[in-house]
Image (cartoon, rainbow, N blue to C red):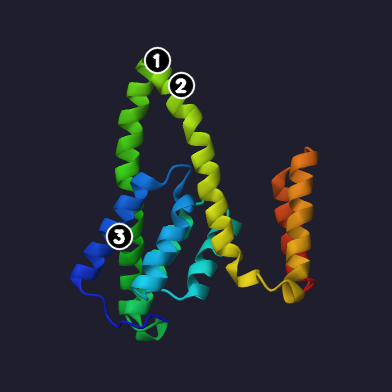
Amino acid sequence: MMATGNMNPQDWLELFTHFSVLSLMGIGGAITTAPEMHRFLVNEKNWLTDASFSSSIALAQSAPGPNVLFVALMGWNIGVNSAGGLAAGPSAWWLGLFGVMVTMVGIMLPSSILTYKATKWAHVNRNLRSVRAFKSGMAPIVIGLLVSTGWLLSAAHRNFELDWKLWLVTAISVALVMRTSLHLLWMIAAGGVLGGAGLL
């Protein structure tokens, strides 16, 4: 639960501004900015707990649709928590929806405008050496950001004695992705079945 009580307009503006800045840093998608979101929302502002942060990402990633949905879930949780939880009634629902709007507009608007403008320019200038070099240089940055996100999300499962089954499933999944043409969705489904059966 949120420890700081009701959010004032300055808090909401700060939340919007922070997600707007993250929008411009999200090379490779919003998920690559998860470590910075965690630092801001959990460590600095105490608007979310570690558990609610991780649950927002896990739930959004397992649901159909774009992976940016985890931002909407974080906004929802922040809004509901600021009202004192769902027990607060309609005000919690409205603040949850307001949180969704603040975080989603913040994370989507700046990057959408930048992408539109940059894509038009890059299409016209696609044969320039600098454009080709920029595209090539982005690949390792995206990979590094995704690795840092994975490391952050694995923090809850770093006790190998307790979580060896999860690490084993992860290792097998990585091997299958690298060595076979088996689609990733089959591995996600298998993980869901194993978890649902209580084997993980």
Check disc 2 and give the amino acid type.
Arg
Answer with left or right where residue 145 lies relative to residue 37: right
- Residue carrying label 1: 128
Q: What element carries label 1?
A: loop
Circle 3 crowding by C-alpha within 10 Å: few under 14, some 14–19, many from 20: many
- Residue carrying label 2: 132
Residue 32, horizontal then vertical, whole percent: 48, 50
For the question of whether residue 117 can be seen, the reply is yes
Q: Is mark 2 on a helix, strand or loop?
A: helix
Q: How far apart are marks 1 and 2 (CA)?
A: 7 Å
Circle 1 crowding by C-alpha within 10 Å: few under 14, some 14–19, many from 20: few
Answer with left or right where residue 48 lies relative to residue 140: left
Which of the 4 image quadrants contains residue 156? bottom right
Q: Quadrant of the N terminus?
A: bottom left
The residue located at (73%, 49%) in the rendering is 174
**In this figure, what is the number of numbered marks?**
3
Q: Which of marks 1 and 3 is nearer the N terminus?
A: 3
For the question of whether residue 65 can be seen, the reply is no
The residue located at (53%, 56%) in the rendering is 149
Residue 103, horizontal then vertical, whole percent: 34, 59
- Residue carrying label 3: 102
Label 1 with label 2: CB-CB less than 8 Å:
yes
Name above or below for residue 25 compared with residue 135.
below
Q: Earlier in the sequence, mark 2 or mark 3?
A: 3
The residue located at (46%, 59%) in the rendering is 35
Residue 181, horizontal then vertical, whole percent: 78, 37
